Image: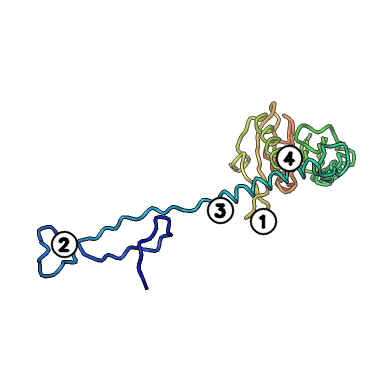
Amino acid sequence: MSSHEPEPDDADTGPLHVSRLRTPLGEGPGDREPRYDAPLSVNPRPVHRDRRPVVLVAAAAAALVGLGALAWVFWPSSGGEGHAGAPTTTTETESREEAETRLLDMVPPGYAADACEAVVPVNGALAQVSCDKNDDTGGPLTATYTLAKDGRALRELFDGVVNASAVVNCPGNIQSPGPWRRNATPEQTAGTLVCGFQQSRPTVAWTTDTDLMVSEVQSGPQGPNMVQLYTWWASHS
């Protein structure tokens, strides 16, 4: 095998072989044996890499972009009045009447058949119903049940109730606002609960997160009081 000096552009092949050793300071060339305890330093060679493949890849990418732009301009439209080439998607949205029917099915028991009616929903809501007195023990005199469009709307609607109330802890010194759980699934948060007063009227409001529902029930200054209203909520949520 013949040896040759590598060209500057050769790929790295590892450390260079050292044919002679340096002698430590203070020793001349006539010393008996070279010493091996002096550290050796090797300066790495710069590697000049060929940049031609990068240029070729960039040129190919530019060509693909150009072809894509042409395809976008001349691709036939899928129909309709939209922009040419724009993808068309169809999503089935629930009508307001369907949302109202679904919401009425989720209203707590204790209301007469004609006690609840649909109203124009507020911003962020799919449907909203307003109810008169609940006939169960400790039931509210008025209530509003709202079906939110999404999780963000649910939080905003609930925050609106909280901001409109003089918030107090719920009976039993329960955190308010705070999470609430069902007895059947105590490890799982069902929503957020708040107790307070609105113009001297005891108010209990809560979210049912899986249903995207906000419920707000109120009594009057003559009762039921907060404890009675909270007890009603505990058996109807």
Q: Quadrant of residue 88?
A: top right
- Mark 1 or mark 2, which is nearer the start of the sequence? 2
For the residues bearing labels 4 and 2, Cβ distance under 8 angstroms: no
Amino acid carrying label 1: it is Thr
Q: Please name which of the two marks, 1 or 3, marks the residue nearer to the observer.
A: 3
Badge 3: how crowded within 10 Å, few (<14), some, or many (20+)? few
Q: Which residue is mark 4?
A: 214
- Mark 1 or mark 4, which is nearer the start of the sequence? 1
- Mark 2 or mark 4, which is nearer the start of the sequence? 2
For the residues bearing labels 1 and 3, Cβ distance under 8 angstroms: no
- Mark 2 or mark 3, which is nearer the start of the sequence? 2
Amino acid carrying label 4: it is Val
Q: Which residue is mark 2?
A: 23
Q: Which residue is mark 1?
A: 185
Q: Which residue is mark 3?
A: 53
Q: Please name which of the two marks, 4 or 2, marks the residue nearer to the observer.
A: 2
How far apart are the two marked residues, 4 and 2, measured between alpha carbons?
Answer: 87 Å
Amino acid carrying label 3: it is Pro
How far from the left and from the top, in percent, is residue 68? Answer: 73, 45
How far from the left and from the top, in percent, is residue 102? Answer: 84, 45
